[in-house]
């Protein structure tokens, strides 16, 4: 089992680095201060998170009690986030028009950052299917309407002559890491397996008849999306949501917008990546698994050399993770820490912050004890008492919502989960979006229906390696 506790750089404990009475120059000599976007073309938000959030010693301290969730759920969550949204500035979308400008979080449109979600139908696996086989012949076989996926291959197909920069993968964001790429391919393989099963039920044997590829595709996709929703509800959400607020979240109506889910709540999941991973046969650092360029190639160690049980099975060993008030110092994109980019999107997109009325309305739905816990002054006092660090109430209330939820998880979260407020926001907003999905029912109860990501992966593995 590997984790973030292997610090070969300092030999100092977290108290030595984070004690606010220490000389700042000495602290900076031990661990370089993250950039926080000083070289980027955006203004850093007021009251950003403390500078040490992405330092190695603080990460080690925070993760010591939070590493309880199998790390595969990090990438399951990333796939869900990609299926919910891909936001861009509104002026990047020609068809949006000035007539569609709307206030953001109550701020007049002329003063606010405007966003448009390129995923126009969230949570129907558009991140995998795109516009479907009629429009994407590079992604689907035009005769069978199935994904162009070769059994036992772990990555999507390259479409050029040895050019790995063009692949049969709809959403390029699903290549961010090796694990996410492989996970997306597994879901594509699951669609092909369901299509084969459905074709057989329709009397077509193992091959789709020339008259029915569209009908088989539609039925298989409906079933796959239903399984997708089932796994989100039964396998993913329980990993991150405090059981004590699930029913509150399901029964309350919260007037919260999509931007807050994507940029205020889902950003907390950047606390999950570890600095290294146990693959079963080897250990890989996070920096080796992040996409360095478009010409990434399939690993030579074999199709299932990655032991998925270590990623999704609680009892299989492997690396664990959890939501905390820290991020891995190795989570870099183009040599810049992801926290820099998150601060930029917090400014650009304007997700709700803890002090805003909409979030305080959600706080009022919690039990009284939990309401008191998430008061910024209480959180600041508890951070100093329990974590021995100074965090100002202003940085909690006015700073990015994702940091307030990370700190809440560190102080009050159990089992690596969110704290009460993060759990309420996440469960409610996910349930609200799942209820809005328009999708056909599964065409048959005889089709494969795994109950967890590990069951789905095992199903595909046994199909390819009988």
Image (cartoon, grey):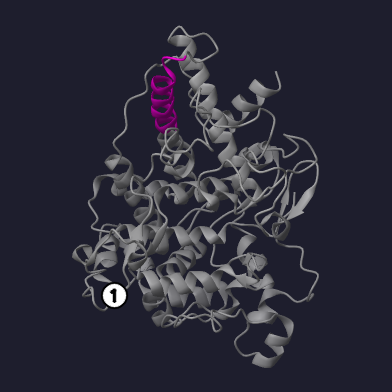
Find the residue positioned furthest to the front: 161
Find the residue positioned furthest to the left: 99
Q: From the viewer's perspective, is residue 91 above or below residue 139?
A: below
Quadrant of the snapshot with the C terminus: top right
How many neighbours does mark 1 have within 10 angstroms: few (below 14), some (14-19), or many (20 or more)?
some
The quarter holding residue 454 reads top right
Q: Give the x, y percent position of residue 233.
A: 41, 38
Q: Give the x, y percent position of residue 81.
A: 45, 51
Side (left or right) of 110 relative to 219: left
Q: Give the x, y percent position of residue 405.
A: 44, 64
Side (left or right) of 89 relative to 207: left
Q: From the viewer's perspective, is residue 361 above or below residue 463?
A: below
Q: Give the x, y percent position of residue 335.
A: 66, 71
Is residue 92 shown in magenta?
Answer: no
Is residue 214 shown in magenta?
Answer: yes
Using the image as rendered, state which of residue 200 and residue 403 is in the foreground.
Answer: 200
The magenta segment:
210-227
Residue at horizontal 29%, vertical 46%? 432
The quarter holding residue 152 reads top right
The quarter holding residue 227 reads top left
Give the labeled residue for mark 1. Answer: 112
Q: From the viewer's perspective, is residue 9 above or below residue 308?
A: below
Residue at horizontal 26%, vertical 79%? 111
Using the image as rendered, state which of residue 266 and residue 178 is in the foreground.
Answer: 178
Residue at horizontal 31%, vertical 68%? 114
Question: Is most of the magenta stretch helix, strand or loop?
Answer: helix
């Amino acid at each position: 089992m590997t984790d973030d506790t292997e610090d070969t750089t300092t030999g100092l404990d977290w108290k030595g680095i984070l004690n606010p009475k220490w000389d700042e120059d000495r602290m900076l000599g031990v661990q370089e201060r993250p950039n926080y976007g000083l070289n980027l073309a955006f203004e850093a938000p007021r009251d950003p998170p403390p500078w040490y959030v992405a330092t190695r010693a603080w990460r080690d301290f925070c993760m010591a009690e939070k590493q309880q969730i199998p790390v595969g759920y990090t990438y399951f969550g990333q796939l869900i986030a990609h299926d919910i949204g891909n936001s861009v500035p509104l002026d990047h979308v020609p068809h949006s028009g000035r007539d569609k400008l709307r206030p953001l979080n109550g701020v007049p449109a002329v003063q606010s950052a405007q966003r448009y979600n390129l995923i126009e139908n969230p949570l129907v696996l558009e991140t995998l299917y795109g516009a479907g086989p009629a429009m994407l012949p590079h992604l689907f076989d035009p005769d069978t309407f199935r994904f162009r996926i070769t059994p036992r291959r772990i990555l999507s197909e390259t479409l050029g002559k040895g050019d790995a920069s063009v692949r049969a993968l709809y959403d390029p964001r699903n290549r961010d890491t090796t694990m996410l790429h492989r996970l997306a391919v597994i879901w594509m393989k699951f669609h092909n397996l369901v299509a084969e099963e459905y074709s057989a039920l329709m009397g077509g044997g193992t091959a789709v008849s020339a008259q029915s590829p569209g009908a088989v595709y539609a039925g298989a996709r409906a079933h796959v999306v239903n399984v997708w929703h089932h796994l989100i509800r039964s396998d993913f959400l329980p990993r991150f949501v405090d059981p004590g607020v699930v029913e509150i979240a399901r029964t309350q109506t919260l007037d919260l917008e999509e931007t807050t889910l994507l940029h205020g709540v889902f950003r907390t999941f950047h606390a999950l990546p570890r600095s290294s991973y146990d693959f079963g046969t080897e250990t890989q650092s996070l920096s080796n698994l992040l996409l360095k360029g478009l010409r990434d190639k399939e690993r030579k160690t074999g199709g299932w050399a990655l032991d998925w049980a270590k990623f999704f099975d609680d009892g299989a060993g492997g690396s664990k993770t959890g939501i905390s008030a820290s991020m891995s110092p190795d989570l870099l994109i183009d040599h810049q820490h992801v926290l820099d980019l998150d601060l930029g999107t917090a400014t650009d997109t304007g997700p709700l912050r803890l002090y805003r009325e909409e979030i305080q309305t959600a706080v009022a739905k919690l039990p009284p004890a939990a309401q008191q816990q998430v008061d910024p002054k209480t959180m600041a006092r508890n951070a100093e008492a329990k974590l021995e660090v100074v965090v100002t109430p202003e940085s909690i209330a006015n700073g990015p919502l994702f940091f307030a939820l990370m700190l809440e998880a560190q102080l009050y979260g159990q089992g690596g989960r969110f704290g009460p407020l993060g759990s309420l926001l996440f469960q409610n907003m996910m349930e609200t979006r799942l209820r809005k999905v328009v999708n056909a029912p599964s065409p048959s109860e005889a089709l494969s229906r795994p109950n967890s990501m590990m069951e789905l992966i095992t199903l595909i593995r046994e199909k390819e390696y009988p």
